[in-house]
């Protein structure tokens, strides 16, 4: 009887469509394919950027040309052809918007399909949203409420115009243009993203959220996020992403920089649900992201991520614990199914005294997917009493998938205490049997067990996201136990 | 002329002068090996496998490649490096040359002799052709280098159903007759079905001159055979060792390799287990106790290819002064290897600022019905335990030593030869600079 249900489920899963795989026909202003200096200058011009910005981009481009694509990650994929991608695509808007009523109705429909309504509903749930479609930010809500407290939350392109001093001071300080291949590419061609500044001592009254969507075909998305939490402030930031189902592989190369000054705290949560490709592994988004945060004295940065989408993920949200008593946290669930590949993890660089870091990584692989954890814990010679705890658990479903761990631990101080543990297992037949015996069918039982497995991480997500993430987990994995 | 060029250019002379059979299969292997080495060269830090260990300080030496003749070394001088409390077979090499005077070999129940005779005598041709250089990795340029110059070392061939009563000691001495010397011993161990053997291996420099040893050992463990292999690495601060050991196991066999690293300038241990059957048990144990500027790099690999196998790995390290420890443990579980149990543990204690640990425990798992785990810790002695002991009148230094001794004891307990256990215990006590005050 069991077998029957599982086969049924398997079929259901295979045919289950990517919910967000639709494409909205919005008139778009799209650059011709290819990348050269002119394109970089054109993007800069389009954004009406000051000269220092154009210069910064060109320098990044120069560096990028010299660099080679990284190959050390445990993923295999067809290299994107950078000359076949359009590096800028924007939904055409006739004029600047004064109120939401003027937004293109097609756009609004898209948001509704995505489950984001920019109107009242969101207002009730108390989340300020910045929405980025293809390459540009199209709508930002709640600006006024935030402004009252001096919080700046706007597309980064606007921030370059309106707060150049802040952008100039911090942009590229955490992830320099020379950092890696994709960071350099992003620095050269990023078209938009979110910018957020929380002034001294302010606790942001609501969750800030950015929603990314790739809409046009043949484009890449390169967004840049910069979050600055000034002394003693607090902000919780959410990020979500979707893309239409396409046969081609689309490239997403983002850079996120977080700066937590003394006593500040940033909580950054991601639910990544880019199109993962179909069940034969065709199409899907390449997700090559560089995320890094800097903690000053007593500051705290917490990364929480739920990775269910993308054909290939290459992502290592990191913390540089520069200040004394600073804290870095990383909570991650990475789910891979079918032919998805994920190589994800974190870097915790301990520089200050009494710094603490916690890493909880849960990998779930099903189908023919490969899931890797790759992390670095580094204790510098001058960092006294550093403390790290890492735990990487992998759950395997089916015998065609793989789970890998590559933890690097480098310790140069005798006062450090480091613990690392990793386990790999599958869902036990006894656990399933126990559930079945109590009248819970196999599908529900798996959901239950997976939820329990990921609970430590799910608990760290803000409420609204936790529910969404839980659903995502179920959708990505239902019936994949054979 | 750098070392690589020197090695390559002296290869021809080595083959011609050495009185080696140029028609044999081994000659073909050597030729291929030197070519591979020429292409690959010495590994650099850019190489992921050599990320934490640099060979640069070693390669600048002008090593003498072929130390001349057999030196006479009196038994008195080397006695203390041998375990004499028990009867054993001994294979003793001085500057890479077999010393028949100091050694005890046999051909009775099994063959315990030298590789040079195995490579040349027709009666061993079958064995050599079948096993020699079949599991040493081709992409590892250092073991290729060893293969190219393979000439002398231990040859141990145990037939079916034989329990070798005495342990076998393999000891490589260097006398320092030349200022800087490169030794490349090559060992081949074949253990037949249902047989059992214990082997102790040691490299020892008798002078203060620089030595570099690039050793390769291949061990074949057949059905239901049991092999215990002990490596004692307690050399002088001018000696460096690159030790590559390849173990191939057939079904239901049990192989254990224990590595005790207490001294040497740079030690690199490559230890690989290939499981070629079901119900295999592989054990890897190690202790590193380092001080000064010593550097030990333990690279292990267990490749699970068949179902129902186990591997247990336990490495402990105590690092003081400016020493560096590297642990890179890789466990691969292939898709077919269902029901695998693989455990790996690595515990480290840092005693001084300036000491460094780089650990990379790695799991690569392609099968779902497995139990695999690894744990890695880095820490210090428990302050409260120290205080407890001090409050009961134990001086701080002794308390510290006792705690460290207890820390290492897990691994020492695994030694199956009592006399060897005593020896290792003493070495540990000496390295921790303590007098335990009691005999163990």
Image (cartoon, grey):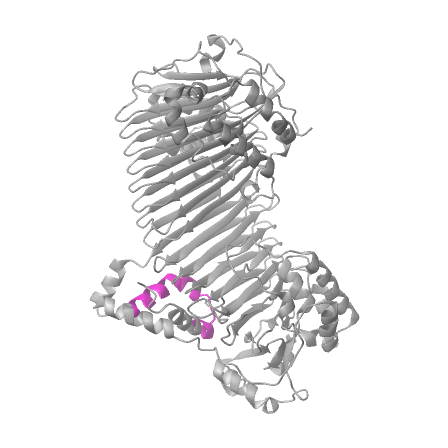
Residue B242: where, in percent of width, then height?
52, 30
- The quarter in which the C terminus of chain B is drawn is top left
Is residue A446 magenta-colored? yes
Residue at coordinates 44% horizontally, 29% vertically from top-left?
A: B217
- Above or below, comparing residue B281 to residue A122 in the picture: above
Which is the main secondary structure of the residues drawn in magenta? helix
Closest to the observer, B10 or A258: B10
Residue A9 spot, x, y in % from top left: 31, 71
Q: Please identify the quarter of the rendering in which residue B103 is found.
A: top left
Q: Does residue A45 appear in this view?
A: yes
Q: Is residue A163 visible?
A: no
**Residue interval drawn in magenta:** A443-466
The answer to whether residue A232 is above or below residue B387 is below
Task: Name the residue nearer the viewer: B20 or B141.
Answer: B20
x, y percent for residue A230: 64, 66
Name the outermost residue toward the bottom: A101
Q: Which sits in the foreground, A103 or B391?
A: A103
Number of marks in picture: 0
User: Is B5 situated left or right of A461 in this image?
Assistant: right
Residue A280 higher or lower than A141, as above or below: above
Foreground: A88 or B39? B39
């Amino acid at each position: 009887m069991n077998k029957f249900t599982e086969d049924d489920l398997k079929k259901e899963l295979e045919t289950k469509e990517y919910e967000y795989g639709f494409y909205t026909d919005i008139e778009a202003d799209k650059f011709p394919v290819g990348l050269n200096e002119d394109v970089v200058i054109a993007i800069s011009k389009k954004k009406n950027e000051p000269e220092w910005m154009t210069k910064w981009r060109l320098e990044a481009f120069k560096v990028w040309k010299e660099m080679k694509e990284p190959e050390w990650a445990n993923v295999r994929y067809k290299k994107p052809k950078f000359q076949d991608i359009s590096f800028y695509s924007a939904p055409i808007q006739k004029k600047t918007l004064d109120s939401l009523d003027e937004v293109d109705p097609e756009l609004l429909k898209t948001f509704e399909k995505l489950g984001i309504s920019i109107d009242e509903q969101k207002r009730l749930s108390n989340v300020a949203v910045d929405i980025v479609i293809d390459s540009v930010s199209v709508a930002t809500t709640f600006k006024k409420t935030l402004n009252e407290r001096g919080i700046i939350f706007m597309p980064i392109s606007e921030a370059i115009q309106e707060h150049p001093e802040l952008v100039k001071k911090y942009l590229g300080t955490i992830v320099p243009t020379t950092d890696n291949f994709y960071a350099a590419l992003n620095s050269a061609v990023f078209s938009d993203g979110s910018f957020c500044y929380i002034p001294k001592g302010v606790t942001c009254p609501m969750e800030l959220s950015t929603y990314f969507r790739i809409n046009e075909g043949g484009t890449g998305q390169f967004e840049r996020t910069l979050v600055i939490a000034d002394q003693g402030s607090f902000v919780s930031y959410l990020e979500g992403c979707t893309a239409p189902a396409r046969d081609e592989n689309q490239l997403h190369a983002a850079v996120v920089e977080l700066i937590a000054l003394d006593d500040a705290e940033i909580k950054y949560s991601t639910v990544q649900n880019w199109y993962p490709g179909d069940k034969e592994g065709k199409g899907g988004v390449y997700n090559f992201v560089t995320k890094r945060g800097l903690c000053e004295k007593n500051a705290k940065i917490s990364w929480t991520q739920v990775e269910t989408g993308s054909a290939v993920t290459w992502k290592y949200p990191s913390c540089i614990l520069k200040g004394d008593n600073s804290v870095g946290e990383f909570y991650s669930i990475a789910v891979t199914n079918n032919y998805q590949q994920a190589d994800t993890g974190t870097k915790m660089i301990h520089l200050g005294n009494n710094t603490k870091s916690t890493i909880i990584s849960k990998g779930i692989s099903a189908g023919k997917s490969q899931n890797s954890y790759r992390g670095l814990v580094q204790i510098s010679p001058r960092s006294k009493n550093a403390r790290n705890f890492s735990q990487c658990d992998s759950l395997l479903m089916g015998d065609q998938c793989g789970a890998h761990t590559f933890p690097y631990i480098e310790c140069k101080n005798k006062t450090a205490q480091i613990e690392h543990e990793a386990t790999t297992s599958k869902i036990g037949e006894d656990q399933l049997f126990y559930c079945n015996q109590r009248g819970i069918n196999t599908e529900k039982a798996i959901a239950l067990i997976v939820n329990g497995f990921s609970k430590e991480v799910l608990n760290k997500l803000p409420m609204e996201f936790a529910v969404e993430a839980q659903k995502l987990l179920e959708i990505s994995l239902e019936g994949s136990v054979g | 002329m750098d070392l690589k060029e020197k090695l390559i250019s002296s290869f021809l002379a080595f083959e011609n002068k050495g009185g080696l059979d140029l028609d044999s299969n081994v000659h073909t292997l050597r030729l291929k090996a030197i070519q591979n080495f020429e292409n690959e060269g010495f590994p650099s830090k850019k190489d992921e496998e050599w990320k934490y260990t640099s060979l640069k300080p070693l390669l600048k030496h002008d090593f003498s490649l072929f130390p001349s003749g057999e030196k006479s070394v009196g038994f008195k001088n080397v006695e203390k490096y041998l375990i004499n409390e028990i009867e054993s077979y001994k294979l003793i090499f001085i500057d890479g040359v077999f010393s028949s005077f100091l050694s005890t070999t046999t051909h009775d129940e099994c063959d315990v002799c030298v590789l040079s005779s195995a490579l040349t005598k027709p009666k061993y041709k079958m064995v050599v052709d079948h096993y020699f250089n079949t599991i040493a990795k081709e992409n590892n340029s250092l073991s290729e280098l060893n293969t190219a110059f393979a000439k002398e070392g231990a040859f141990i061939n145990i037939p079916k159903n034989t329990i070798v009563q005495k342990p076998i000691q393999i000891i490589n001495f260097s006398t320092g007759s030349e200022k800087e010397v490169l030794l490349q011993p090559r060992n081949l161990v074949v253990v037949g079905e249902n047989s059992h053997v214990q082997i102790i291996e040691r490299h020892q420099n008798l002078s203060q001159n620089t030595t570099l040893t690039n050793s390769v050992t291949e061990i074949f463990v057949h059905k239901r055979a049991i092999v215990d292999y002990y490596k004692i690495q307690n050399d002088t601060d001018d000696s460096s060792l690159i030790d590559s050991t390849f173990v191939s196991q057939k079904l239901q066999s049990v192989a254990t390799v224990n590595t005790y690293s207490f001294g040497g300038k740079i030690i690199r241990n490559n230890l690989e287990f290939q499981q070629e059957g079901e119900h295999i048990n592989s054990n890897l144990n190690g202790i590193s106790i380092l001080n000064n500027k010593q550097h030990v790099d333990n690279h292990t690999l267990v490749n699970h290819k068949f179902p129902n196998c186990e591997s247990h790995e336990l490495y402990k390290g105590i690092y003081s002064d400016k020493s560096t420890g590297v642990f890179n443990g890789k466990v691969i579980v292939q898709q077919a290897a269902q029901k695998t149990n693989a455990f790996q543990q690595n515990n480290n204690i840092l005693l001084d600022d300036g000491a460094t640990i780089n650990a990379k425990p790695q799991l690569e798992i392609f099968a779902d019905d497995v139990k695999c785990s690894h744990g890695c810790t880095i820490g210090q002695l428990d302050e409260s335990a120290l205080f407890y002991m001090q409050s009961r009148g134990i001086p701080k230094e002794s308390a510290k030593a006792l705690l460290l001794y207890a820390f290492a004891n897990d691994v020492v307990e695994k030694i199956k030869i009592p006399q060897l256990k005593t020896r290792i215990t003493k070495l540990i006590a000496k390295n921790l600079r303590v007098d335990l005050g009691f005999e163990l």
